[in-house]
Amino acid sequence: MDPIAHTLFGAGMAEAGLRSKTALATATLVIGANLPDVDALAMFIDSDTALYLRRGWTHGILALLIWPFLLAGTMLLFQRLLTRFRTRRARAGGRFHPTHNGPSMRLKWLLGISFLAVWSHPLLDWMNTYGIRLLMPFSDTWFYGDTLFIVDPWLWLLSGAGVVLARSRTKLGMSGWVLLGAALTTLVITAVMVPTAAKVVWGAGILTIALVRFSGRTGRVARPIAFSLMMAALLYSAYMFAGARVTAGQARAHLAEEGVRVTEVMSNPLPARTLVRTGVAASETHYYRFRYNWMDRSSFEFIGGAIPKEEPGPVVEAALSSPDLKGFRKWMRFPVYEVRELNDGWLVLIRDLRYTSPRAESPSGIGMAVVEVGEELQVRSVR
């Protein structure tokens, strides 16, 4: 998921009750919820290196066992340094006991919260179609939940609403939330793929948060509200998970009626849509693209005809061997290859049906690569 979703989910867990369990609980939850994404620094190298490194080592089982201890240790050290600083400042002011508001440091709770925060990250990442390599460094197998779109406004709304109500007591805090809300609303309203009805619901949700906040009655009920909203976020995720499984089952059933044995199905969530999904089903020999409203059995339809699966020939193998595609070739899930002959070589179009149309002509995003291969099977360019 995107960093905003991870951050709001971590902050939402804090406001739902965990921030009272130990000192620095909120900071630990927010940092831990984002910690595995340190591999995002690879994006500053190039997009293919990012594909090669992303959601691997830092998201794998070994790192997930180590991160919580490192996080808890860092927060404990920070707390001790902070206490020492407060003590010195208090003594300099003529007092010998530093003032301290909030819960004391409780190591068991700190470690438990660190695990919860860090492990929330791969859970959310697993839910989309991009994939995550949970068994790294022992295996680089990709796992997919096919449940939530990688940017999900409803997850933002549900996990963030409780945080806004609890953390907007000052003018500075209120200003920050207003800016974030305006930015997210702009993204949702201007997104072409988001249906009009979803935009209206989003606007109503933002308006409701504002009305509740300015009613002045959220002080005592902020925590119950945040807890209820986090439960709603979990129920929403479970609902979307059920939709993914039902959709995949329908794809298998429809293809079985035609005598096709399916080996894998991707149920693709669409931006801000909770019912309609697209997807790709794979057999040993073909891919099948489809669309389905999982609350309406009669709505299932195939998109276009079957797309043959072909083993890479020498020209395609040469294209895939390019160092500039080391990440892309490991990350592809439903690859299709097209070879076009040139006067002095070939043009190889490599498409991953997750994110691009089988008729796409040029790369847009991460789902396609175009490679020019010379007559001696040397790679001349990649884009």
Image (tube, rainbow, N blue to C red):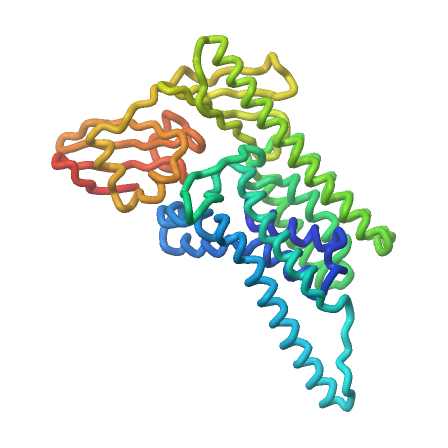
Left or right, residue 138 beside residue 158: left
Answer with the quarter of the image where residue 292 lies: top right
Residue 105: x, y in percent?
A: 71, 68
Asked if 365 appears above or below 290 in the picture, the reply is below
Asked if 126 appears above or below 338 in the picture, the reply is below
Q: How many marks?
A: 0
Residue found farthest to the top: 258
Left or right, residue 40 beside residue 195: left
Quadrant where the C terminus lies? Answer: top left
Residue beneath the point at 50% across and 35% down? 144
Residue beneath the point at 20% across and 41% down? 379
Left or right, residue 383 beside residue 2: left
Residue 46: x, y in percent?
A: 36, 51
Answer with the quarter of the image where residue 149 lies: top right
Residue beneath the point at 85% across and 51% down? 221
Quadrant where the N terminus lies? Answer: top right
Residue 151: x, y in percent?
A: 56, 41
Left or right, residue 308 beside residue 261: left
Residue beneath the point at 73% across and 88% down? 91
Residue 16: x, y in percent?
A: 75, 51
